[in-house]
Amino acid sequence: MPTNTDDIALPGRTAPLAMDADTFRALGHEMVDQVAELLATLPDRPVTRGETPSEVRAALNAERDLPETGEDAGAVLGRATTLLKEHSLYNGHPRFFGYITSPPAPIGILGDLLAAAINPNVGAWVLSPMAAEMELQSIRWLSQLVGFPDDGGGILVSGGNVANMLGFWTARVAKGGLEVRTAGMAGIGGGRLRAYGSAETHTWIQKAADLAGLGTESVRWIPTDEDLRMDVGKLRAAIEADLAAGDRPFMVVGTAGSVSTGAVDPLPEIAKLCREFDLWFHVDGAYGAFAAALPDAPSDLKALAGADSVAMDPHKWLYAPLEAGAVLVRDADRLRDAFSYHPAYYHFGQSAINFFDRGIQNSRGFRALKVWLQLQHAGREGYVRMIGDDCRLSRELHRHVADTHELEPHHQSLSISTFRFVPDDLEERAGEEAVGEYLNALNRAIQARLEREGEAFVSNAVVRGRYLLRACIVNFHTDTDDVEALPEIVVRTGRKVDAEMRTEGLGEG
Amino acid sequence: MPTNTDDIALPGRTAPLAMDADTFRALGHEMVDQVAELLATLPDRPVTRGETPSEVRAALNAERDLPETGEDAGAVLGRATTLLKEHSLYNGHPRFFGYITSPPAPIGILGDLLAAAINPNVGAWVLSPMAAEMELQSIRWLSQLVGFPDDGGGILVSGGNVANMLGFWTARVAKGGLEVRTAGMAGIGGGRLRAYGSAETHTWIQKAADLAGLGTESVRWIPTDEDLRMDVGKLRAAIEADLAAGDRPFMVVGTAGSVSTGAVDPLPEIAKLCREFDLWFHVDGAYGAFAAALPDAPSDLKALAGADSVAMDPHKWLYAPLEAGAVLVRDADRLRDAFSYHPAYYHFGQSAINFFDRGIQNSRGFRALKVWLQLQHAGREGYVRMIGDDCRLSRELHRHVADTHELEPHHQSLSISTFRFVPDDLEERAGEEAVGEYLNALNRAIQARLEREGEAFVSNAVVRGRYLLRACIVNFHTDTDDVEALPEIVVRTGRKVDAEMRTEGLGEG
């Protein structure tokens, strides 16, 4: 018997989100056509409109409250498409040289469509049988691509931060002991756990040390050599000093492709030191690990094969749509030790992998599908070609920069090039403190102006007090004409901004 | 001058992942048609094939190594589609009653397609102007949907685990002090930080305490009353005892819709206690928070409005494709205090939100788009109708269970119903220990059999030593005929399994 009067209803429910197959087909074809149009017209669009938050909010009608009543799916989708096409930055644009963000591979875009439609929950094997196996295969393939042992563990995650954090948490338990998980950092006694990375290590290490309860003070930032690579002699000295002080060194982070300049730490030497002191060797290869696939990759990079764990981001140099990060772990049991709350025989026996045992998520999406598709669509050869071309284009760009009057080349490594604009009359005086400060302000302003005008997009690096422009190519749409054009764009913008700043009196003194 | 001989090449690169617009259009239309076919035929497919890992691996050819050469995109996509259609569990199937996983809303599927094509990096505002603003608007709308203050902070994350963990980390800094971040848990001195949740709290709290460096022993599991709701008297006693012992209580987790039975903790009383003792009040509403949108929602649930932070999963009761979790935080500054490494004026001024300041990710995908689309497509009214219908169907199911000979109803709350199969001759003897054990084994076996046969899918709850079958409806495809059918399916399967187990001698003793 119904207990609530409203419980009598429901003779065939109608749901506002339900959609019949014909409507889905029509709206889906329209959306595919919109995306195809975007792919075709991308080079003709600005990289970004450089709008202010207020301008974007006005276009969105950001103050609007949650609508009471529903709206036709086509109308909502149409509005979204228009707003996004007109007010986005396109990291797939051939002249997007900023940060480390790749174009989304078209087959990966379709992969995300299929993943959402199948909608497997890749946390538990039983909820995602084929998807979970495809993820396992993708992890093995990623290992094979970069020369890491392919019989270990691994998991796909949101991106580099979480991939690196998983390495950090795994190291914490592997070297700090299982009691860390129950007793906590304050409860395990002994000296303070210490992690080591070069001064060029990405900010994730701060977040990891903070969020894992070690505190940022537990991180030792090791100075770098003139090429911005970790000074291994100073690493040894720091470890020995900490040991002498009663602390407990537990991991070293080697960076394989620094964000600023693409520098690769001397991984073979770091690996050796980790073996000597029984430390976990983690490699942050979020960007650079993929370049280990190149036959002529430097031996420093190939030595990531000797790490205990490696972070790498398929949404960087595998050109997958966001989000796709990955961590590979030499010994799958260490990953389980750090994250599982289930005995190994849980539910399905050891042969079924439940990914919730390997990371921080419980429910998980199917980000593996795009990786699985892309690795087959391009093959190893295809990736070697695309990654190699990005590196060659970066070297070509650096040569154009060197050949360009008023541009001062700095670093070139992997597919990153740094340089700055130096006005003619300041070239000889760049060493003066006031001139150095002006050049920093000038190049910061050039970067902002480029960002606003949308012809090309660069980000920056600050190296030894110098504000540099930084072009990173992880983009199979970028070609020779783009790297030929960039120096001219920067010089033209630089002259304009310089003139403005001098007029405003900022160039004096 | 080229420094490498290979640097001379590149007269117009060709990239294996590049795809012209016509090819994308053709492959995209084909994929959309495949998805439309799936949507149309879902009810006629098994919920799952119940295959073993070996069977799935054989179908996948899981041992295959990374291909050397690339392959036509259409062929790869076709293989993926076939493999996934034939070897997946469909959480969108109308007779999927397991765990808490919803069907993917069709408009959300198209949202994930568009999100991947635009590919904004929603970590930094400059890389995702419109997408970041859409995420902010979505967070405000989610707040308005469930009655939480809409002028606070929030962020979309992968799912409930991370959403709840963000609440935990935020509480740790808000109540433990900023020095937690630098000095770590071992460095701050003072008593041990203590978190409190009911015995029904989801396992995320273990992971959070572990990964945040507090250790699982820092969690106090408060006993529940007969309705499996936190006993607030015992919560008070635990807090007072810990204070007396010199520990530092810092947060209480109220569960709004437990995973096992949908129980909602007495949130108003917990809120009051948190104010009294100056504790952070976090609500795990990953599942149940959405039901606060119902006009007749229980006052216990509506009291989530008084929390400091609330976790809720759009990929649960907003019916979004995986992944979409969210955490709402009353005071946005607390979120920044816990996660930002940048002063507030960083780069773009306070008016531009960089989501990397609000959580653990740096690069971030555009999971907000499906949420933004779906909230407008259904409107508040549509969600009230769909969520209300799910709850009504659950109550209807529970009545059918009660009316069904051999089924024993247990709990019903929100859209979860629990029950078990009890053979006729054991009904009077269910209290005997051996019989109780047999019933547990029997119902476990029934669940496994259902899983293998794919006619309907339920999961389980273990309550006070009893193994119960558990049906959860967060599915706008589920209708009256499905909840009418389930009891018959369970009884038919139960009789068969019971007979087999008795034949095998497992029923004796």
Image: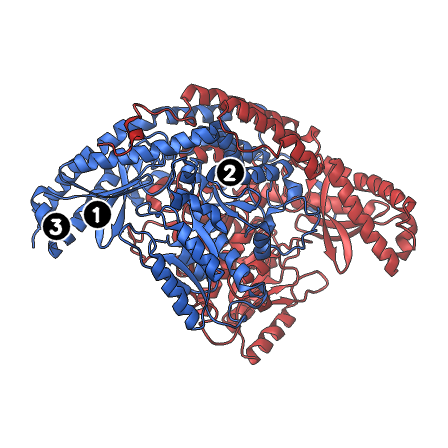
Chain colours: A red, B blue
Question: Depth check: A28 or B153 in front?
Answer: B153
Q: Secondary structure at mark 1?
A: helix
Kindly check if marks 1 and 2 are in contact, taking CB atoms under 8 A apart as contact: no
Q: Is residue A422 left or right of residue A377?
A: right
Residue with the mark numbered 3: B430
Q: Is tag 3's residue or tag 2's residue first in the polypeptide sequence?
A: 2
Residue with the mark numbered 2: B144
For the residues beneath circles 1 and 2, the answer to whether they share a chain is: yes
Q: Is residue B490 left or right of residue B336?
A: left
Give the mark toward the camera: 1 or 2.
Answer: 2
Q: Secondary structure at mark 2?
A: helix
Question: Residue B493: x, y in percent?
Answer: 17, 38
Question: Depth check: B388 or A115 in front?
Answer: B388
> Which mark is on residue B444?
1
> Which mark is on residue B381?
none
- State the CA–CA distance, disc 1 to disc 2: 41 Å
Q: How many other residues sit within 10 Å of disc 3, few (<14), some (14-19) or many (≥20)?
A: some
- State the CA–CA distance, disc 1 to disc 3: 16 Å
Q: The disc labelled 3 sits on which kind of residue?
A: Ala
Q: Chain of mark 3?
A: B
Q: The disc labelled 1 sits on which kind of residue?
A: Arg
Residue drawn where x is 83% and y is 56% of the image: A437
Q: The disc labelled 2 sits on which kind of residue?
A: Gln
Kindly check if marks 3 and 2 are in contact, taking CB atoms under 8 A apart as contact: no
Give the mark toward the camera: 3 or 2.
Answer: 2
Residue drawn where x is 39% and y is 24% of the image: B37
Residue B118: name its quadrant: top right
For the residues beneath circles 1 and 3, the answer to whether they share a chain is: yes
Res. A144 in view:
no
The quarter in which the C terminus of chain B is drawn is: bottom left
- State the CA–CA distance, disc 3 to disc 2: 47 Å
Give the mark toward the camera: 1 or 3.
Answer: 3
